[in-house]
Structure formats: structure tokens, C-alpha cells
Image (cartoon, rainbow, N blue to C red):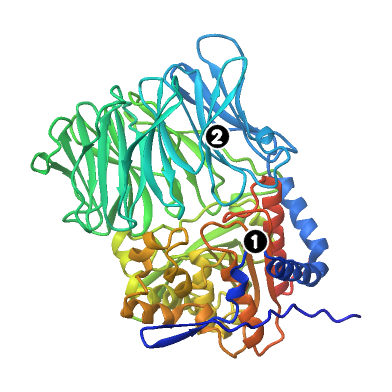
Amino acid sequence: MTAIYPPIAKRIPKKKHLHGCTLSDDFAWLQNKGTKRVTEYLLAENKYTTRMMAPSEVLQKKLYREFLSRIKQTDTDVPYRYRGYKYYSRTVKGKDYPIYCRKSLKSRTGEQVLIDVNRLAAGKSFTGFGDFDINVDNNTLAYSVDFSGFREYSLNLRKLDKTGADIRVSDHARSFSWSLDQNYLFYVKEDDAKRASQVWRYEVDTNSHVLIFEEPDALFSLSVERTRSEQYIIITSQSATTTEARFLSAANPTGVFKIFRRRKKGHEYYIDHGVGQFFILSNERYENFRLLATPENKTNKRHWVEWVKPGRDTVIDSIDVFAKWIVLETRYGGLPRIEVMSIKDKRRVEILFPEKVASISLGHNVEFDVDNINIEYESFITPDTIYRLNLKTKRLVVLKRGHVKGSFKRKDYEVEILTATADDGEKIPISLVRKKLPKNSKKNQPVLLSGYGSYGYPNDVYFSSARLSLLDRGVAYAIAHVRGGGEKGQVWHNEGKMLKKRNTFTDFIACAEKLISANYTDASKLVIQGGSAGGLLMGAVVNLRPELFCGVIADVPFVDVVNTMLDETLPLTIGEFEEWGNPKIARYFKYMLSYSPYDNVQPQHYPHMLVQTSLNDSQVMYWEPAKYVAKMRHNKLDDRVLLLKTNMDAGHGGASGRYDFLKEIAFEYAFALGCFAIIK
């Protein structure tokens, strides 16, 4: 049998000096995107990965068939009502992308297709559909789409008449919203570093653009939206720690935006509009936010009146304002909740759901004066479910539950919550799901442990019909809810960012050790997985404790922390100084350098590793994982598998089509199962 050897990247030393340190980067040449040498190296790595994974091709195909056998390939979403129409999306067997449609509630004209993303995608290797918004006269649709994977969204208008003509409004667009005058569209535009830095007003009749506001501070990005009440257009300037809102009557699109409250470092506030008043979610005085209200003509802080403050262990994540109700998305003890408050008497009621360990959020609710809304719900063992919630009676009714074809039964699986103790005594939750074991059987089994722990994003449990292929093969799946995420609010986030970032890594290690010490698994049966900032987590913990794991899957991993954060021309870099720190300041530089995976690769034994990236990723440049793997090949002392797979067409989220996406999951699962020596 012919031996298979990995490609070895050439070392071309490049040095930089900062804060008394010398940084040596032998593989910086991989950053020359599009050059023959770089392309050939990435393709060589792909070829090596394909050859090394060839023995699992039968398993990959089997997994993919299993995935398809469980899903309803032709399906229709729960519709929502808006301005005399019923809107919905549907999928068709054999087609990768959704089809967005509507039907009139007044006439029997049948279905009108608004956007068939499959047609947009024809002949394209990647298609990322952004969003759409329809003007008040229901005759013009604005939509955004990216064909590069680099999140380069173009903003377009489509006339909803027989012609269906499209008009290009702008490239590099982000959020957008119509005014109440059907002739004006507000949109946000990115700069060269992909920062959402400008708000423009587009006039349809004259095809003219007017710059409304430009955010001068590179730490801040912009968004624009119309309130659900449809009375105001809101521009929000936001950094990682501070916000500032501007508002304008949606009926006066050519007017001047007013500042709601001037920015103050560390003060985050978000506004929404009800009947005659604004509601404010603010972290001033309470780190986990409180709810306040003020008359719409008196936005000065002295008129703000407190309505709800967070209780102990409670976080107010967000608010949604309706004519008579406010719906609060809160968290208690790290778990999500929904609370309904009557605006009339401020009475607040928690809505009870079947399981405590679940993901719960508001669905697509665009109408303002309603007493019924949709709630999205799922858990490890409950498929994605849409509930209709009656805000008066608080009664829940299932409108739709994701259908899992085949023999799936919830009762065949069990969910557990474990707690690991971190180095400093903090209790770190672990959510775990597995197929129920026979009585008196040993717990010890293969475990796939995932983690994220950055930006204050909660890493809640979710249902995956594809994951059943792991569970049914005796593999348990777990999530480590480490600090840096948002499970327990801003405090949880703050304890895993900036100069406390190492808590994220040691928390994850504590979770792995808990699973081993409690006999759920052992090091020879533990594979870990994380993507993006979760890929940074993978790289950091595998440098610190490689003996704890038998395999690692790092998806689009942010592993070259110091070099990336020193390059302010890259997307995201400046805006993330408040998450990671600015390495031009010595204490942040030295702290980053202590954990940056690329800078801490060393001669030691590593687990089996699958590192995946995309050539057109705009958030984590492809060269970070490519350089990381190249350096690993020169340093690792073992002969375990190290694979680099580069999607040459996609962006940060991988393949855009649903079928290719499932094939990517099958590839990852086959790798994990191979680490567990499960080959069927």
C-alpha cells in the first residue's frame, strides 16, 4: 500500500518586534490569497484530507442518507400576517434554498412567489440570502443577497408586479428598512474594513442616495430598523460595551434624526416604541439590564421611569413591545425564559414550557396590535416547535413541530445537567444528551463535547435530527456553558473576556475533567468541537491539555489572535478591541500571547485533529487555520491525523445549500466516529 504523506509548508521567516518581544511567523506567506503558491498548498491539503478520509466514504454516505431520511424535504413554514397578506417560506425536495411567498387575505389570487432563492443561486457556487422588507403599499420588496461567501451583500429592489424587475440599490449593504412613505428606503453601508459605518436614505422615484449619518468611531457599528409600531426609524450605534440611539418619525423620512441619549462609555441601552411612549432596556445601575419607560416627546433621562429591574440570578436579554403588551426574554440561572407584561397594569407572568433545558425565543411577529404571538422552542430531544401564545390567557398552542421521519421517539433519549467546578470555584454548567442506557450498564461512553464562550452569546441547547446518528451509535453529546458566553448575563461574559479570557479555556478543561471523573467518558473517548471563537477555544485547550482528548474538530478557528488583532485593516479587528483587548497596549499583548493557539503550538503529542476553513471567510481569514496547521505539522511529535479542509467557495458559515451543508456534517461526524473507532 502506498504511504500517504501530508504537504509540508515551506518556512519563510518573518519577524516583528513589539513590547520587547520578537514574533516569528514562518507561514505569513499563506496570507497572499489567490497566488499560485497559496492555492496549490490549500488544494494539496484538501487532496491529503480526501485521501486520509477515503476509508470513511462509505460511512459518510450512510450518514448523509440517514440525515435525509429524517427530514421533510418539501415543507412549509408557519405563516405570519402583515398588511393584508399571509407570508411564509417553503422548501422543495431536491432544491437547496427556500422560496419566499405570500397570499392575499382578501382575494383568492393564489400564491405569489416573492423570492425564489434557488433562481438567484442558479450558476452560483455560493448564495447567502440576507433579509427582505416590503414597503407599505405592498408593491416593492427590498432584499439582500451575497454570492461570494465574504458577506458582501448587495441591496436590491424588486417590483411585485408582473414584470418582477430588479433594481440594484447598493453594494456592501447591511440592515435596511422602509419609511412609511413608500418612496424611501434607509440602509446601512459597510466600509472597506466591513464595518457598518454609514446610514443612507434612498429615494426610489429619483434613484438618489443621501448620506444621513456616518459613525466616526471605529469601535462602533450601525444598524437601522423600523419599530414594530411603525412610527419610528431607529439608528443604533453599538460597540461591544456602549450604545447610542437616534430616532426619526417614519412618516417624516426627510427629517433629522434626534439622539435619544448621548453615548456614555459602558452604558448599553436599546429602545423600542409602544403607544405614546418609548421603552428602554438599559444596563445603567444594573449590569443585567432593567426596563424603563418614557413619554415619546420626553426622552431626556430625567423622565425615565423604572418598570422592571433584574432579580437575583436574573438577566433581561431583550424586550419586544406590542400595543398592549411587552414580552421579555429573560434568563434565570442560565436558562432562558419568556415573561409577558401588561402595559396597562404592569403585571408580569412567566410562561411555563414543557422542559427547563431548552431554547426559547420569539418567532417572527411583525404586527403591533395583537393578542397572539409566535414563540420558537426546541430542546435536545424536542424538534423545533412554533407555539402560538395568547397574551391574554397565557395559553400555549402548538402550531407546528418539526417532523422527524423514521423511528425517533423522545422517550428513547435522556438529558442531564452536570456541574463542573472551575479553578476559582465557579460552577460551570454542562448540558448532555444521550440515548438511554440499559439499567445497570456502565455510563462510560464516547462523548462529543462542544463549546463557544465569547461575545456574551448564550450557547443554548438545540435539536438536531442529524445528531441522532451519533446518539443512536452510542455517542453522547454535551455543551460546556463556559464563561465568556451569555448564559448568566453580562457578569458571565465579563469573566471570560479581555484579561480574564483564560477562564474560558480552564472552564472547558474543568468540564472535560468532570465528564471523565464522573465516568461519563474517558480521554480515549472524548472528542471536542468548536467554531470561530469556539475554534480559538479548541486551539487553546489542546495546547494546554492535549492528553485529555482523543480528537478535535475546529471549524473556521480564530487561532492567530495576536497577528489578527494587530492588523486593523482586517474586518472586525478594531471593533473587537473591547472583547480581546488592543495588543498595541503591552498588558493586552502579553496576555493574548500567553494563549493565542498559533503562538503556543509546541513540540508535544496532540490528538487527532480536523481543522476546517473557507477561502472567502470574512470573519476568520482562511490563513489563520492554514498557518496553524502548517506550524502544527512542523512541531507535533505524534503520528495522529492532522487534517486541513478548505472550502474554496464558501464563507464563515460553510456551504450555503442545505444538501451540501448536510454533507459537511456527515464528514465531521465520520471524523469523530473514526476517533471513537466506530466505523459503521
Going by the numbered disc 1, the residue's amino acid type is Leu
Q: Which quadrant would the C terminus be assigned to in this image?
A: bottom right
Mark 2 element type: strand
Q: Nearer the viewer, residue 106 or 354?
A: 106
Q: In this view, does 24 lie above or below 491?
A: below
Mark 1 element type: helix
Q: Which residue is denoted by mark 2 in the rendering?
A: 400
Q: Is residue 434 above or below residue 539?
A: above
Packing grade of label 1 (10 A; few <14, some 14-19, many >=20) is some
Which numbered disc covers residue 635? none
Tell me whether circle 2 and circle 1 mark residues in contact (CB < 8 Å).
Answer: no
Q: Is residue 336 visible?
A: yes
Q: Can residue 442 be seen in this view?
A: no
The picture places residue 493, in percent across and down from the top left corner, at 34, 64
Measured Cα–Cα span from mark 2 to mark 1: 25 Å
Q: Which residue lies furthest to the top in this view?
A: 107
Q: In this view, does 656 lie to the left or right of 397?
A: right
Residue depicted at 52% across the width and 60% down the height: 415
Going by the numbered disc 2, the residue's amino acid type is Lys
Residue depicted at 69% across the width and 73% down the height: 643
N-term-proximal mark, 2 vs 1? 2
Q: Nearer the viewer, residue 440 or 283?
A: 283
Which numbered disc covers residue 471? 1
The picture places residue 494, in percent across and down from the top left corner, at 31, 66
Tell me where residue 292 sits by quadrant: top left
Q: In this view, does 239 lie to the left or right of 613?
A: left
Q: In this view, does 196 lie to the left or right of 273?
A: right
Tell me where residue 145 sits by quadrant: top right
Q: Which quadrant would the N terminus be assigned to in this image?
A: bottom right
The picture places residue 361, in percent across and down from the top left corner, at 42, 44
The picture places residue 52, in percent across and down from the top left corner, at 78, 72
